[in-house]
Image (tube, rainbow, N blue to C red):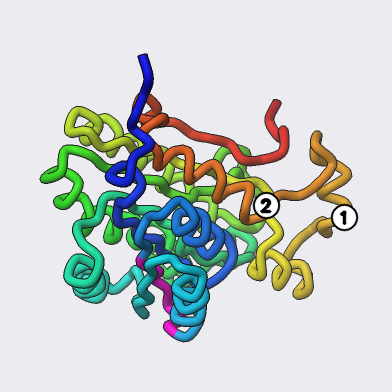
Amino acid sequence: MVDNTNSVEATNRVAVVTGAGSGIGLSVARQLAALHHPVALLDRSGAAAQKAAEELNEQGATARAFEVDVVDRPGVDAALEKVRAELGAVKIMVTSAGIEATASFTDIDLADWKRIIDVNLTGTFNSVQSAVPDMIEAGWGRIITISSSSAQSGAPDRAHYVASKGGVIALTKALAYELSPKGITANTIPPSIIDTPMARAAEESGEMLINFEALASMTPVRRTGTPHDVAAATAFLCSDDAGFITGQIIGVNGGWYL
């Protein structure tokens, strides 16, 4: 039997990507736009999101940019209302917005702890909860959260970051149980080291214990990851072909934890 799900209807689904101004989020937005999904790029940096959206529109895609901090729930809700007005109901949500921090456990103060949890975990909650009603009404949806391999392995001097990303993994599994009967899948990608501006900044500041060259030599595939590696996996999880995959941790990590 021929599967005709690769139709205009199957590809023309509105996607929202948070943290889409750079790095993994930007690559995901580009990949989904290349697959003919109208894409809303949300980012704290409105200028970065706008520049990316303009580039996508010049290439024939349909993209809109919105400046929003995912910690600001009213701001997230307002942005998604604009997405609905300009592009349509949200069918795909990819939560890539996140921040990192490095400090020994005894030096983490409550404000630092709260900020990391607010952005990485509560920001994910805000974004997904704001979009899910559209998916429930449609009887179809895709949720992909970007977590971190450090939530699986642990990491020194990053207890707040590891905890926040571990929460993202747990939240995603809970969403899969609750929402999959409604036609909505939820999966998480915990990348290992990915060559992004944020990671390069950490290397330059000395926050990374090992540099990119050393990490590449330690990785089974003998290279570090790229944003496109994560974007390609994300795009598959957003497809109809991935409809039987939910609640899963899809490691895009070059073979770590074999």
> Residue 21's spot in the image, x, y percent?
50, 72
Q: Is residue 170 above or below residue 65?
A: above
The residue nearer to you, when weighing 193 against 22, is: 22
> Residue lying furthest left in this view?
137
Q: Look at discs 2 and 1 and give the one toward the viewer.
A: 1
Q: Residue at x 38, y 36 (%)?
A: 6
* The N terminus: image quadrant: top left
* The C terminus: image quadrant: top right
The residue tagged with tag 1: helix, strand or loop? helix
In the displayed structure, does residue 30 sit left or right of residue 187? Answer: right
Residue assigned mark 1: 213
Q: Is residue 213 above or below residue 115?
A: above
- Amino acid carrying label 1: it is Glu
Asked whether 170 falls inside the magenta stretch, the response is no
> Residue 252's spot in the image, x, y percent?
61, 40
> Residue 184's spot in the image, x, y percent?
26, 37
Callouts 2 and 1 close, C-beta under 8 Å: no
> Residue lying furthest bottom in this view?
47
Q: Residues within 10 Å of mark 1 (few under 14, many from 20)?
A: few
Asked whether 44 falls inside the magenta stretch, the response is yes
Q: Give the magenta range.
A: 40-46
Residue assigned mark 2: 156
The residue nearer to you, when weighing 145 against 8, is: 8
> Residue 19's spot in the image, x, y percent?
46, 67
